């Protein structure tokens, strides 16, 4: 899982650097980190409970399914990162489009063009 964590968080960090919406990204990141910590703590607690019980045999069978669950979690985390990238890209494009439209309408209103021609 270590390799995944490294790749996942370096992807998240790259997004964070590129983004003007860093605060939002930091919130998402801390949310993800907290959830992963909670998840790991929960799993550890479960393992402790299982060790102390006679249900060990049943749980070992059930635990085979937890590998799948972890993969599903990883996949959904990646989807979140990809979705955030796309959202940021869309916001950036909208921002540029709005800027261009403003510039255009300013050009049409001659009196203002002299006072507001810094880009």
Image: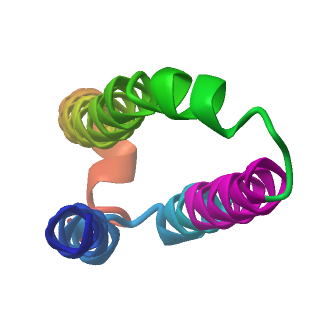
Q: Residue at x 50, y 61 (%)?
A: 25
Residues 118 and 66: in front is 66
Dominant SS of magenta comes to: helix
Picture residue at 48% right of the left edge, 70% below the top: 22
Relative to 61, is 43 on the left or the right? right
Residue extent of the magenta highlight: 32-51
Please say whether residue 109 is visible from this viewpoint. no
Residue 62 x/y as whole percent: 53, 22
Q: Position of residue 59 (x, y in %)?
A: 62, 30
Report the side of 53 relative to 88 (left or right): right
Q: Position of residue 73 (x, y in %)?
A: 42, 34
| Lateral position of residue 1 relative to residue 39, left or right | left
> Residue 67 falls in which quadrant of the image?
top left
Image quarter (top left, top right, bottom left or bottom right) of the C terminus: bottom left
Is 98 on the left or on the right of 10, as rendered? right
Q: Nearer the viewer, residue 105 or 63?
A: 63
């Amino acid at each position: 899982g270590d390799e995944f964590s490294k790749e996942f968080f370096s992807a998240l960090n790259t997004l964070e650097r590129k983004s003007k919406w860093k605060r939002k990204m930091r919130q998402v990141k801390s949310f993800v980190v907290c959830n992963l910590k909670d998840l790991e703590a929960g799993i550890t607690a479960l393992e402790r409970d299982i060790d102390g019980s006679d249900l060990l045999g049943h749980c070992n069978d059930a635990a085979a399914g937890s590998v799948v669950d972890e993969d599903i979690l990883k996949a959904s985390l990646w989807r979140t990162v990809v979705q955030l990238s796309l959202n940021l890209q869309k916001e950036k494009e909208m921002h540029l489009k709005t800027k261009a439209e403003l510039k255009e309408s300013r050009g049409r209103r001659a009196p203002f063009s002299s006072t507001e021609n810094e880009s």
